[in-house]
Amino acid sequence: MNDIVELEALPAVSMRDKVNAIEAEMRRMPQLDMPVKHHFANKGTPHGTYARELFIPKGTVLTGKIHKFEQINIMSKGDISVLTEDGRLLEAPTDGIAKCRLSEAKAPQGAKA
């Protein structure tokens, strides 16, 4: 039997389907506890600000939650590969806006951590 498959013969797969497949495999692997630090400003007011901080160890593969609203991301240290439609390698310091209704897979490189 020939295991070689022509790429053109494979059905087109959406990015969300790719991330879902990655998540299914990840659930079979040992899980890592990554505590989240929560930061609040103007707590209790109608226009309070919330941010969270997460340390992701080198060698970790994770996926992000699909958000209803855009999110601000600030990476202060290290570098990380992000699986998106165009694929990206982000290096600190950097920031950006995570679009709503987007799912991504991430893998820290740790070269600068």
Image: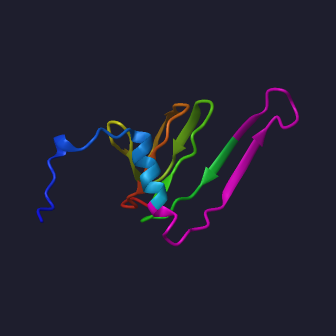
For the C terminus, which image quadrant?
bottom left
Q: Is residue 11 magenta?
A: no
Task: Point out residue 31 in the picture as x, y percentages from the top left corner.
Answer: 56, 69
Point 54% across, 33% down: residue = 101
Q: Is residue 68 left or right of residue 4?
A: right
For the N terminus, which image quadrant?
bottom left
Q: Reply above or below: 40 against 48.
A: below
Toward the viewer: 79 or 18? 18
Toward the viewer: 13 or 63? 13
**Is residue 78 in view from this perspective?**
no
Task: Point out residue 61 in the picture as x, y percentages from the top left corner.
Answer: 45, 59
**Is residue 10 in view from this perspective?**
yes
Point 44% across, 62% down: residue = 25
Q: Reply above or below: 95 against 19.
A: above
Task: Point out residue 54 in the picture as x, y percentages from the top left corner.
Answer: 60, 54
Residue placed furthest toward the top: 46
Task: Please identify the quarter of the rendering in which residue 33 is found.
Answer: bottom right
Q: Is residue 32 left or right of residue 78?
A: right
Residue placed furthest toward the front: 1
Name the image colouring. Answer: rainbow
Residue placed furthest toward the right: 44
Toward the viewer: 112 or 26? 26
From which residue to which does the magenta span run?
Answer: 25-50
Residue placed furthest toward the left: 2
Task: Point out residue 58 in the picture as x, y percentages from the top left corner.
Answer: 44, 64
State the count of labels. 0
Point 43% across, 55% down: residue = 22
Examine the residues drawn in magenta and state their main secondary structure.
loop
